[in-house]
Image (cartoon, helix red, strand yellow):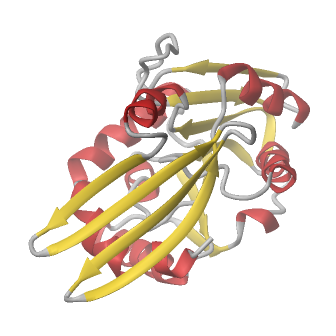
């Protein structure tokens, strides 16, 4: 996975404009609702990116630890926390190296941040989320649902293409689904100021029964799926959200 290219300055240029404060506020409210957070709870936001949820949740009275592998994002998150006057414990940690032990009332992975490694590694990461929770703690996982991609793939010769303009600049993302592995392979081509860059990554896609089985084998006592509003998950749901209880 081309981490530095995917989450470098081109990410700021093309993706940040869509991550408006109003969106972050709505998503933070969803996290509180779906995870059943109460004021004063200890919360792990992993990965936290540039802190757009962690800082809002901290401003609402939660004790938040935000972890990410990207030092640049962590610096941005800390700067925003100072501007907002909130206290968040930001740490540079790779998800594959998390070693928390029963330290949190809840954990969250939001905005399709799970499934970027091989199955063995991703299962281990899920177990690390579980170990981070106190008994009864809850883990909220948000992902793209597999089903919504299929019509576009079938209509476009088994490829899905997204095109994004920012002024004269262009980002094109080409996605193909490996049906046997249930994994999306994506190439993101950016053309900015006459410079072309290509970044590649793949992400695991899940059916509801499969991700629930993963949660059970990771040690969660309970797990259920829902849509982004907490309702029934269907083939038309925009998001697949999983809530696991330690």
Nearest the camera: 158 or 111?
158
Q: Position of residue 180 (x, y in %)?
A: 74, 37
Is 10 left or right of 119, judged from the image as shown? Answer: left
Q: Position of residue 175 (x, y in %)?
A: 48, 51
Q: Which x, y percent locates residue 135?
A: 83, 33
> Residue 217: which quarter of the image?
top right
Q: Position of residue 204 (x, y in %)?
A: 66, 45
Q: Disc count in the image?
A: 0
Q: Residue at x 49, y 40 (%)?
A: 158
Q: Residue furthest front?
A: 157
Quarter of the figure with residue 188:
bottom left
Identify which residue is drawn at 80% across, 40% down: 134
The answer to whether 75 is drawn above or below residue 36 in the figure is below
Residue at the location (57% across, 68% down)?
89
Position of residue 50 in the picture relative to residue 225 (left or right): left
Q: Quadrant of the C terminus?
A: top right
Residue 225 visible in image: yes
Q: Residue furthest left?
A: 167
Q: Left or right: where does residue 45 sit relative to residue 160?
A: right
Is any part of residue 19 visible from this angle? no
| Quarter of the image that includes the N terminus | bottom right
Along the line of sight, the residue nearer the viewer: 122 or 45: 122
- Residue with the most extreme top position: 232
Where 163 falls versus 39 (above or below)? below
């Amino acid at each position: 996975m081309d981490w530095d290219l995917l989450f470098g300055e081109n990410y700021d240029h093309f993706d940040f404009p869509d991550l408006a404060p109003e969106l972050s506020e709505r998503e933070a409210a969803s996290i509180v609702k779906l995870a059943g957070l109460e004021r004063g709870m200890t919360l792990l936001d992993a990965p936290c990116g540039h802190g757009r949820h962690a800082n809002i949740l901290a401003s609402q009275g939660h004790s938040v630890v935000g972890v990410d592998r990207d030092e640049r994002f962590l610096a941005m998150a800390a700067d925003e926390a100072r501007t907002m006057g909130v206290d968040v414990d930001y740490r540079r940690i790779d998800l594959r190296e998390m070693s928390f032990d029963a330290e949190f009332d809840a954990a969250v992975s939001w905005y399709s941040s799970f499934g970027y490694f091989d199955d063995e590694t991703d299962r281990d990461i899920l177990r690390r989320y579980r170990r981070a929770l106190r008994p009864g703690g809850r883990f909220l996982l948000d992902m793209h649902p597999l089903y919504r991609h299929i019509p576009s793939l079938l209509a476009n010769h088994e490829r899905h293409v997204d095109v994004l303009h920012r002024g004269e600049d262009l980002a094109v993302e080409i996605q193909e689904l490996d049906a046997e592995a249930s994994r999306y392979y994506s190439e993101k081509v950016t053309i900015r100021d006459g410079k072309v860059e290509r970044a590649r990554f793949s992400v695991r896609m899940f059916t509801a029964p499969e991700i629930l089985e993963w949660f059970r084998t990771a040690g969660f006592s309970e797990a259920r799926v829902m849509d982004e509003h907490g309702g029934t998950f269907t083939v038309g749901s925009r998001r697949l959200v999983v809530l696991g209880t330690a």
